[in-house]
Image (cartoon, rainbow, N blue to C red):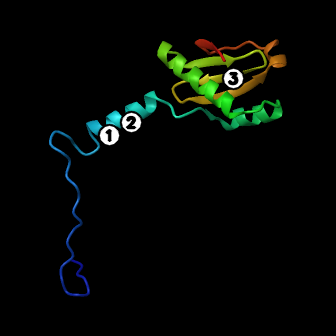
Amino acid sequence: MIQRVSGQPHLPAQTASPRRGETAGGFGAMLRQELDRAQPQGVAFSKHAITRAEERGIQVTPDLMDQLAGSVIRAQAKGATNILAMDSEKAFIINVPNAKVITAITQEEMKESVFTNIDGAVFL
């Protein structure tokens, strides 16, 4: 047993006990996690998508980020998991559950592209 210099025995730190009917990391923590997941704080870009946007001259503005976040929310409501979010000049493939942009494409590239493994499309 380790004792303090004063000679008094070391007592374990007091921990807060869970409220009645709640276990540590229980329902309250699970509810918070589900609420956070259901309402994405925004859309993130993968490293690949950042590289593609830079190479293709696609400017990522706050307005565009809001549009992409809105498209994720609309796609979630319909149960989509991978979407093509597009306007007349650019398009983005987005993984909806992770709210992550996978790649960015310009209008010129859209003409020659075939999009696979998507289950929805959203117009920005």
Spatial distance from mark 1 to mark 3, Cα to Cα?
A: 33 Å
Task: Report crowding for label 1: few under 14, some 14 to 19, many 20 or more residues within 10 A (C-alpha).
Answer: few
Q: CA distance from mark 2 to mark 3?
A: 27 Å
Q: Position of residue 112 (x, y in %)?
A: 82, 13
**Residue 2 sits above or below residue 106 on the image:** below
Quarter of the image with the N terminus is: bottom left
Label 2 with label 3: CB-CB less than 8 Å = no
Residue carrying label 3: 92
Which residue: 69% across, 23% down? 92
Q: Which residue: 70% across, 32% down?
A: 49
* Above or below for 86 versus 69: above
Give the residue at mark 1: 29
Q: CA distance from mark 1 to mark 2?
A: 6 Å
- Mark 3, Cα crowd under 10 Å, few <14 / some 14-19 / many 20+, is many
- Against 54, residue 76 (above or below) is above
Q: Residue furthest left?
A: 20
Give the residue at mark 2. 33
> In the rendered image, which quarter is residue 23 located in?
top left
Picture quadrant where residue 29 is located: top left
In this view of the protein, which residue sits in the foreground, 48 or 15?
Answer: 15
Instruction: Give the x, y percent position of residue 6.
Output: 22, 87
Q: Amino acid at mark 2?
A: Gln
> Mark 1 and 2 residues: CB-CB less than 8 Å, in contact?
yes
Viewer-proximal residue among 81 and 39: 39
